[in-house]
Amino acid sequence: MQGLMMDYPLTLNAILGRAERIHGRKEVVSRRPDRSLHRTTYADIASRARKLAVALSALGVRTGDRVATLCWNQPEHLELYFGVPALGAVIHTLNPRLHAGELSYIVHHADDKVLVVDETLLPVFESFRATRTFAHVILIGHGGEMPDGMLSYAELVERADAEAFAPRVLDETDAAAMCYTSGTTGRPKGVVFSHRALVLHSLGSAVPDAFCLGESDVVLPVVPMFHANAWGIPFAAAMVGAKQVYPGPHLDGASLLELLAGERVTFTAGVPTIWIRLLQELDRAPGAHDLSRLQTLIVGGSAAPKSLIEAYERRHGLKIVHAWGMTEMSPLGTVARLPRHFADVPEDRQNAFRAKQGIPVPLVEIRAREAEGLVPWDGQTMGELEVRGPWVARAYYNSEEGDDRFTADGWFKTGDIVTIDALGCIEITDRAKDLIRSGGEWISSVALENALMAHPAVAEAAVIAVPDPQWQERPLAVVVLKPGQATTQEDLLASLAPHFPTWWLPDTVEFVEEIPKTSVGKFKKAALRERFNAPPAPVPGGLDAAS
Ligand code: ADP
């Protein structure tokens, strides 16, 4: 017997339509390059997104064509997020922090037809311009001169006739957006998001035990719109009608604090390095900023040390919520919200739970595998995490590289090594390529890093494997001290000793000024391996491949 419900397509047009009709007056606020604040509304964004679709159509953009963007978190990017897919075309967000060679590879591989570039990012475009001809380059200007051969975004949108808009999405499984992985271990790989996946991801991420987003929220994604769709937050916030606040190019701690306080932000999200920097700013002038509205700081992208979570809570009364995901998952997978029965357990155990990566959000399934088969959910046995769900990739775009990440029975191999406990809560012990193998046993670099960052003098710590003739590999710690702080290798190792077996302790601690970061703000362990003469990481593929 068939269900008798409508076959209603899950498309981004439905999200934008609702934002316009129900929450049309809600604000989208952004900081411009000159630091001024720009205010618009969902009604305006929706109308301009339609006009953008009309203008792009007139320029020859057709169903399935890729429109690349080099933009910050700014309102035009939100217009592109909805306007390009409304046309049946695909928005391809480029990461401006990549090297020219990588950008050139990515725009060729994706076969981008049109590029929309913010004026502040023209130097990035110039860096690979000679290697790629686009049908059109459209500039989002801020008062500078219009370079030859480019079209003005503002004029295109202004002149287009909104009445001429005809949505061209044919099917909910049509592509809406694409994004390349950072390619730490091989070529960047293209992930193509369907309308359906993005709509379901918006619903799944907004639920109370995930991001818990509603109409009364004021949302500031620090995570860039070129990093896994800003974790889907712009779509989810539009769906529920939350006010959005965009920092534009100004991502320093002081600018963020001013926006968080001034716009009475309730929800924000970013990678740990952002919150580590912001904490230093908060500590410098405790109480100077009114963050009383701020209920949730989502931290993800790499492991959030327990000490960071505790520092925010104890020193500033702010709640960090740890989440895990990946570009291939649109990107949300798990969130560590404290289960109800944890309410009465001691604070230290609560915080230990909150420092884990969390429980899968609805519709995401998890399992972990080691050489002998699936691991038990005992919170101890490590295995490579596999996932499936309606917003998980089933293949990479036009690439055979990475095909081995998809299992014959329809799961995606994440390359992350985890334990899963009886509650279904995952704890990431490492990326497969970062695990340290010492004397046939595994050492978790994440666990050592978290413990080092709990030391009062340490700002940042990364642990890598270095070759060892006797043990095969041994851990080496790279540490950045907080300004004005001093400590020694002996002191740091003594602080680790009570928490780990002796053979886990790093043999060497290197003190450095800065840990190099990837284009999305994570520790660049590949660069550290090179600097400290460690072998390059093996290609990920689970415990098997790494051993
Ligand atoms: P990349 O890091 O390759 O640029 P993604 O942003 O998609 O690409 O990152 C996904 C990876 O980031 C995950 O596979 C995992 O290794 C890591 N990651 C994400 N969130 C967390 C977290 N909360 N804790 C630890 N690692 C995380």
Image (cartoon, grey):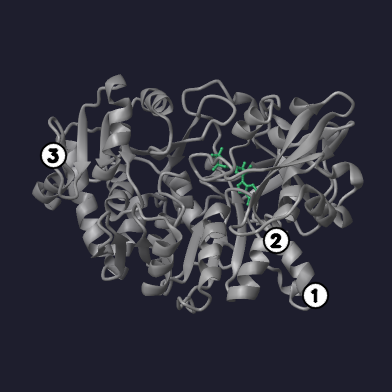
Q: Nearer the viewer, mark 1 or mark 3?
A: 3
Asked if the residues shown at circle 2 and circle 3 are in contact, with their CB atoms under 8 angstroms apart, the answer is no
Residues 56 and 276: in front is 276
From the image, tell me which residue sits under label 2.
Answer: 306
Which quadrant would residue 431 be assigned to in this image? top right
Q: Amino acid at mark 2?
A: Lys
Residues 161 and 348: in front is 348
From the image, tell me which residue sits under label 1.
Answer: 345
Total marks drawn? Answer: 3
Could you tell me if residue 326 is visible in this image? Answer: yes
Image location (x, y in percent) of residue 110? 39, 27
Q: Residues within 10 Å of mark 1 (few under 14, many from 20)?
A: few
Q: Amino acid at mark 1?
A: Val
| Looking at the image, residue 324 lies above or below residue 38 | above
The CB of the residue at mark 3 lies under 8 Å from ligand 1: no
| Looking at the image, residue 429 lies above or below residue 395 | below
Q: Nearer the viewer, mark 1 or mark 2?
A: 2
From the image, tell me which residue sits under label 3.
Answer: 146
Asked if the residues shown at circle 1 and circle 2 are in contact, with their CB atoms under 8 angstroms apart, the answer is no
In-image side of 16 versus 328 (left or right): left
Q: Earlier in the sequence, mark 1 or mark 3?
A: 3
Q: Amino acid at mark 3?
A: Met
Q: Residue shown at 20%/56% (left/top)?
A: 47
Q: Earlier in the sequence, mark 2 or mark 3?
A: 3
Q: Residue shown at 28%/63% (left/top)?
A: 42
Q: Residues within 10 Å of mark 2 (few under 14, many from 20)?
A: many
Residue 62 disc label: none
SS at badge 2: helix
SS at badge 1: loop
